[in-house]
Amino acid sequence: MPAPGKSTVAEQAATRTGRGRAVFAVCALVASLAVLLSLGTWQMQRLAWKERLLADMTERRHAAPVAIEAIEQVKREGGDIEYRPVTVTGVFDHGRERHFLATFDGQSGYHVYTPLQMADGRFVFVNRGFVPYDRKEPQTRREGEVEGVQAISGLARDRLAGKPSSLVPDNDLARNVFYWKDLSAMASSDGIAPEALVPFFVDAGDAPNPGGLPVGGVTQFDLPNNHLQYAMTWYGLALALVGVSGFYIWRSRR
């Protein structure tokens, strides 16, 4: 039979261990809840940001088009030019068109980016639209290679700061296949100097081209907006954690 003193010491040690475990469990619970609630709140903030962005984008798309010089002024002042309606006049240099790998209406092919030379001698790359794989080369769609001065209406699209992801392949300049829209590479591979280049793209509208190609009006507006679902997931996990912890405490006390 153990001595009373030794039993008391063992009981006190067990009590301290139990209290330590309880404190650790409470701290872990509070920390986990804080993380889950923070993630949910962050997604709600992202939701508000995305809704403002979509509303602003819709408002811009339906604004009256302005001359390209006005868009350049907004760009110089540090404003956002994305999806602003624009008009530009010039002559297409079809021999310098660049091809961006893309899909349209479930079909794979390319967007045709053609430099348009304006009256001041500078170039702006215009996304004229989509062509299927087998119509990549200009000689397969001669009717659409319009000549002379053209008036283009479309949307301004800002240049990318860099490759969107490391998973995106490098552009194949030798084959004239672009996997991401690198404006500098498009221009340099065409022999267009930076000072002769308008620093953004123009996506042409859906006005039909002779022969039907390229198919214009290919700008995508369906930005994903799943932030509410993500927020509900994080908040739901937080609620589940509270429920499980409460049930465990209730069982322990019984």
Image (cartoon, rainbow, N blue to C red):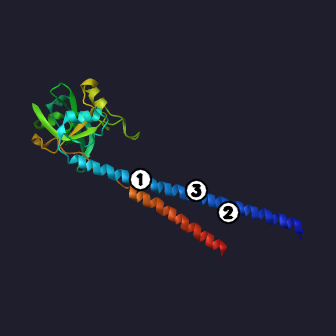
Answer whether residue 6 is visible to the viewer in this image: yes
Q: Residue 234 vs residue 226: left or right?
A: right
Tag 3's secondary structure? helix
Discs 2, 3 touching: Cβ within 8 Å: no
Residue 22: numbered disc: 2
> Label 2 vs label 3: CA separation?
14 Å
- Callout 2, which amino acid? Ala
Q: Which quadrant: the N terminus?
A: bottom right
Mark before the other along the chain sequence, 1 or 3: 3
Residue annotated with mark 1: 45
Q: Which quadrant: the C terminus?
A: bottom right
Q: Residue 122 vs residue 52: left or right?
A: left
- Callout 3, which amino acid? Ala
Tag 1's secondary structure? helix
Extreme-front residue of the structure: 77
Residue annotated with mark 3: 31
Residue pictured at 54% horizontal, 68% vertical: 243
Residue 229, located in which quarter of the rendered image? bottom left
Mark before the other along the chain sequence, 2 or 3: 2
